[in-house]
Amino acid sequence: MKHTAVLLLSTPMRFARKGAVAAISQFLIAHHGSVLHSDDHLDSGRDLFLSRLEWDLDGFDIPISEFERNFQPLAERFQIHYHLALTDYRPKMAILVSAYDHCLADLLYRHGTGELACDIITIISNHPTAKPLADFHHIPFYQLTNPKDKRASEREMLELLGQDVDLIVLARYMQILGPDFVAQYLLRMINIHHSFLPSFIGAKPYHQAFERGVKLIGATSHYVSADLDEGPIIEQDVVRVSHRDTVEDMLCKGRDLEKVVLSRAVRWHLENRILVYKNKTVVFL
């Protein structure tokens, strides 16, 4: 594991032009922080400068517990909104899944190989299908006791998850979560939707795509918001289809997309590469 820190930040462009970037770099250098990576983006339409800075903590003379107090004068001076993360921290992740387990299987494989640096604390499902996978990977599995009662299921999940979980992944969890549940985990829940959003929101998007006669189908990974399938988009990909493809063909092609699109989004979140603003994301790769 690396012993580094990541700062994801945004500031109005007028402050970026007035020395915010130089001031941040000088702050880190003055405290013996060696900058390893720096990536910036200018959103001129929204008058925002966005950045990801990663620096080595070996020799850095501010304890992380004191970082906010020391950085706050600079943040106030340049109206900087920021999030600080440590790369040697292993986030606690939970996975929600329904009957389709292809995304779950892919995530568990990538976790087992070390690609996803986190601790998967539980798998929760409204179906028994995923239990053999969970058992094989030695991860606690919990089947909801009354899956037909959505509100009761959400209360049950809240009790299981609490507030200690860092990330919840909806790996084809085919239930619409209520706004009260979503509000508990804003920007801590990632969903995979089996269409190229904003097209074909909701249920059976491949059937909708088939009826519409599209030539491309896609998958979209996004943060969950109270509005169905309208949270900030993290990653998307597409595959070509033709008039010869049946709905089953589309489902098969789509499953391959869903796995890779979801795993990319989860990995980038775990690596602190995503900055969310105005219902959009910047992904620093």
Image (cartoon, rainbow, N blue to C red):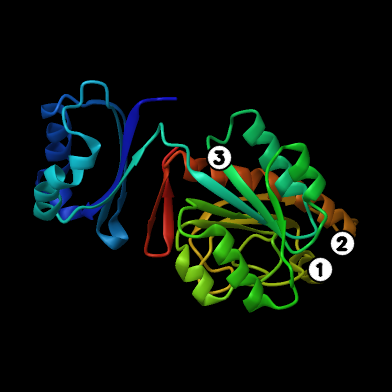
Residue 98 is drawn in which quadrant?
bottom right
Percent across and percent down for residue 164 are 46, 53
Of badges 2 and 3, the one in the foreground is 3
User: Rounded to the nearest whole Å, what is the CA distance between mark 3 and mark 1?
Assistant: 36 Å
Percent across and percent down for residue 86 are 35, 36
Name the residue that disc number 3 marks.
Answer: 119
Residue closer to the observer: 173 or 195: 173
Residue closer to the observer: 144 or 245: 144
Q: Looking at the image, tell me whether mark 2 or mark 3 is earlier in sequence order.
A: 3
User: Rounded to the nearest whole Å, what is the CA distance between mark 2 and mark 3?
Assistant: 36 Å
Q: Is residue 148 above or below residue 267?
A: below
Name the residue that disc number 1 marks.
Answer: 207
Left or right of 65: which side holds 39?
right
Name the residue that disc number 2 marks.
Answer: 247
Q: Quadrant of the N terminus?
A: top left
For mark 1, give the secondary structure.
helix
User: Looking at numbered disc 3 in the image, what kind of residue is underneath it?
Assistant: Asp
For mark 2, give the secondary structure.
helix
Q: Is residue 100 above or below residue 34?
A: below
For mark 3, give the secondary structure.
strand
